[in-house]
Amino acid sequence: MYEFKADNAGTHWWHSHTGLQLGDGLHGAFIVREPPETDPHSALYTEDRHVMVINDWPDPPQMYRYMEEMQDQWIVPMPINVLVNGRGRKHLVSPPVNSTYNATYTPFQRFTVYPDTRYRFRVIAAATRCFFRLSVDSHPMMVIASDGVPIKSATVESLIIHPGERYDFVLHTMDNPSGSFWIRIEALGDCKPASGHGAAILYYETCEICNENIPLPVGDPFAFTYTGLVMNPEIDILTAHTGNNLHLSDLRYETSSDENYTTETVHSRHYLHLRYQTNDNSHYSHPTLYPQSSRMGLLTPTINNITNFIPAIPLATQWDDVKDKRFCNASTLDTTNDCNNDLCHCTHLLDVQLGQVVELFMYSQSEDPHQMHLHGYSFRVLGSGWVHNATYPDAYQTITMDDVINRDKAGEFPRNLVNPVYKDTVTVGSKGGYAIIRFKADNPGIWLFHCHNEGHMMQGMALVFKVGNTNQFPVPPAYFPVCGKTITDMQTKNLHPTSASDGLNTCAFIFGFALLYKYVCFDLI
């Protein structure tokens, strides 16, 4: 059991970081509400009761699907279900033998509302890979927060939400509704050809005791037509420049007094190249037993051509016990020439001093967007977009990371330094997309930075920040599990051991804790 002070109000969630347990359902909402006097948007709504957790759910377990993808069977879209709070009408359930009941489908999630009322909805994308476009029939959405942080309100017809992201919106119900309405969730990316769509019901309650056999809303829940403003269309350059869009770079932090960072000094700036490594991944496909010539070949997602290696012992709590410190980054490797024949497999570490201002410029040449998430911090999003013009959508293929760095130093990519929006997960658009973020490194420890596509993270699209010296790290609580230490020995000594010794190996057990939200079990974001 872990105790901590919930001093970070907003819409958050917890999930496992062991294997693909997140995709198999080990996640949940974590809502920290605040009193109206400190909520800048409290006057915009009267009810705060609805939480919407959206996740993708394949029929087989996630690991089964993941291993098939490692053998290049990803090229055939696999059936996917999209669930809302664990519900989705996909499967016909047969009645018991000799029963008088009829066969029925699994139910849709229902959100009950009353007429002429303003409801705050909290939406969480607890997905492993799919991203979604959310809309509510005949009801505009006033978006007021992202990733647990208030933003200046914006009313849209639909919003696109990526894995790890959260959005809060206010929905004003009708005075005289004609019935129930569909909440439509269109799956995008490679989930779209797999017919991975979802739906829920906005149900108007007009009686204290209502009939459970309510009629479904009118129309096909999986038919999608949009005409209005869409928020967060950060997928690819053509999508982002087609239609009526409100971009991430257009959002601003909601604050009573302006935050101005125009005179801020950046102490540590890092350029991160997000791309698929074209050489085969020998960790998944034995070069002799499963040669690349017999398959299409596996593309490995990387950061600066590096595949992150996770030590068996957690760095945050047992730094001195990790003997195999295979640390690396772009300054220690020739990632342009040395990582193309085989993977550069090492612990991708960026070391920053406590209190420094850190800026990350991410540039993607991948065919898919990447949802980059930082543990332990909310960062400021200073800019995002594409490095080329929509007239030539394929131009990114010849624009190198060095080209982008030189153009940035020449001032071609401006920063918004007044009231930038805060997030902990930012989507870098595919095919030439970029995003610029900053944070002040004031939370000491080891913090994971990774793509929130679980398959990408499993393959090593991650790095770790070491913030401060080890003597500035938080002291682990008493009885905190230690790699190689037995539970009995820890209880006998009544303290946190200072080094590992022989005994029950709990390395895998505690690594999921140590890199995350201080010492809370699971990732709280």
Image (spheres, rainbow, N blue to C red):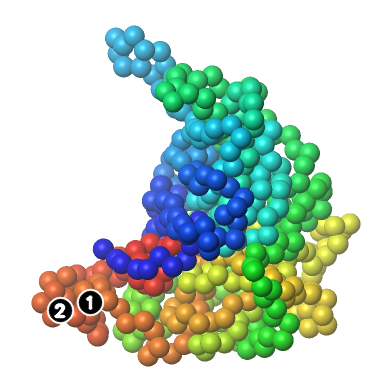
Q: Report whether residue 190 is seen.
A: no
* Three-letter amino acid code of the residue under disc 1: Ala
What separation in Å lies between label 1 and label 2 (alpha carbons)?
Answer: 7 Å
* Three-letter amino acid code of the residue under disc 2: Asn
Judging depth in this view, the residue of 469 and 152 nearest the camera is: 152
Relative horizontal placement of residue 63, taking residue 154 as reference (left or right) = left
Q: Secondary structure at mark 2?
A: loop
Q: How many marks?
A: 2
**Residue 494 shows which numbered tag?**
2
Residue furthest toward the right?
391
Judging depth in this view, the residue of 234 and 388 nearest the camera is: 234
**Residue 478 shows which numbered tag?**
1
Judging depth in this view, the residue of 513 and 144 nearest the camera is: 144
Relative horizontal placement of residue 30, taking residue 293 as reference (left or right) = left
- The answer to whether mark 1 and mark 2 are in CB contact below 8 A is yes
Q: Secondary structure at mark 1?
A: loop
Q: Position of residue 1 (x, y in %)?
A: 26, 63
| Marks 1 and 2, the one that precedes in the sequence | 1
Residue in view at x 47 percent, y 75 percent: 447
Q: Position of residue 225 (x, y in %)?
A: 73, 34
Judging depth in this view, the residue of 135 and 193 nearest the camera is: 135
Residue in view at x 57 percent, y 87 percent: 356
Residue in view at x 37 percent, y 68 percent: 5
**Residue 213 shows which numbered tag?**
none
